[in-house]
Image (cartoon, rainbow, N blue to C red):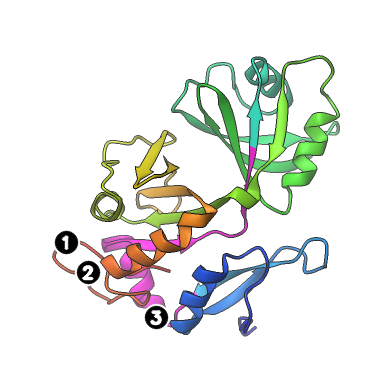
Amino acid sequence: MEPIRTDTPRSQTDPEIHALQEQADASFIPWGTDTPDTPACALVETFGAYEAEYAAIRKGVGIFTSPHKGIIEVTGAERSDFLHRMITNDVNALAPGEARRVFLLSTKGRIVADLILLQERERTLIEVDRFAAGEVVRTLENYLFSEDVALRNVSEKWVTLSLHGPAGAKLIETVLGAKVDELGAMHHGRLEFGEAQGIVYRRDETGSPGLHLLLPRGQAAEVYKKLAEAVGGLVPDVEPDDAGHGGPK
């Protein structure tokens, strides 16, 4: 099946980022339900250089956009205890700066959503498929009574970029000036660049180090462009340069 080519950005995809990808002759695949209420987003399938893209992840760094990911913000003094009772892993033991993969289950034990929890001192962020974020909020709110807990779907405020490969930490330091090379698996920290602030967490999904950037929507396109420029463009070379760089996807 041929990948879908999109001529206009899907509404859930950052239009500036999408335009840069189209200029590099990317092909796209849809993600999500394409209806007026829940329009699909477009994921880059390839820039037409499969071998080079694979080599970048193994030897340098591949940069992925993730418009299909959403964020739920949970606040309140009793949020950890509440989430601990609702999902499949221990949240009470989760310290600020730690992350954990968990599942939200139905009353029949079926998986409702696959989640990544990022624990902070004043809030917990939940990364989830953006097309499931509303259902997750509604499901959790159904079990709230008098607990000091508030849930908000803040997906529209965030854009997620993912860097996979051994040169990811060096690229972040080069472009954003932040040292993240000592960030352990399933840990996260604040990411400050200029007057903006984001979050970076590590989750290895490809056999190489994986660093995921949660960026304010207004700054994400500029960061993406700078990351791409730092590695020589959107289409990677088969062999990385002396700094270990490959190109982004």
Q: Which residue is mark 3?
A: 49
| In this view, 82 is above or below 55 | above
Residue extending furthest left?
A: 242
Q: Amino acid at mark 1?
A: Ala
Q: Hey, what amino acid is under mark 3?
A: Ala
Q: Which mark is residue 240?
A: 2
Give residue 83's position: percent from left, percent from top.
68, 24
For the N terminus, give its image quadrant: bottom right
Residue occupied by mark 1: 243
Instruction: Kindly state the secondary structure of the residue where label 1 is placed.
Output: loop
Residue 148 x, y percent position in the rendering? 72, 16
| Element type where label 2 sits in the image | loop
Q: Is residue 167 left or right of residue 9?
A: left
Q: Residue at x 25, y 49 (%)?
A: 173
In three-dimensional space, the C-alpha distance between marks 3 and 1, rounded to whole angstroms, equals 21 Å
In the picture, measured across the screen, residue 239 lies left or right of residue 55, that is: left
Q: Is tag 3's residue or tag 2's residue first in the polypeptide sequence?
A: 3
Question: Crowding at label 3, few (<14), some or many (≥20) Cα neighbours within 10 Å?
Answer: some
**Can residue 246 be seen in the rendering of this structure?**
no
In magenta, the rendered stretch is: 46-72
Residue at x 50%, y 69% (from the top left corner):
17
What residue appears at the point 13 percent right and 65 percent down from the top-left corner? 242
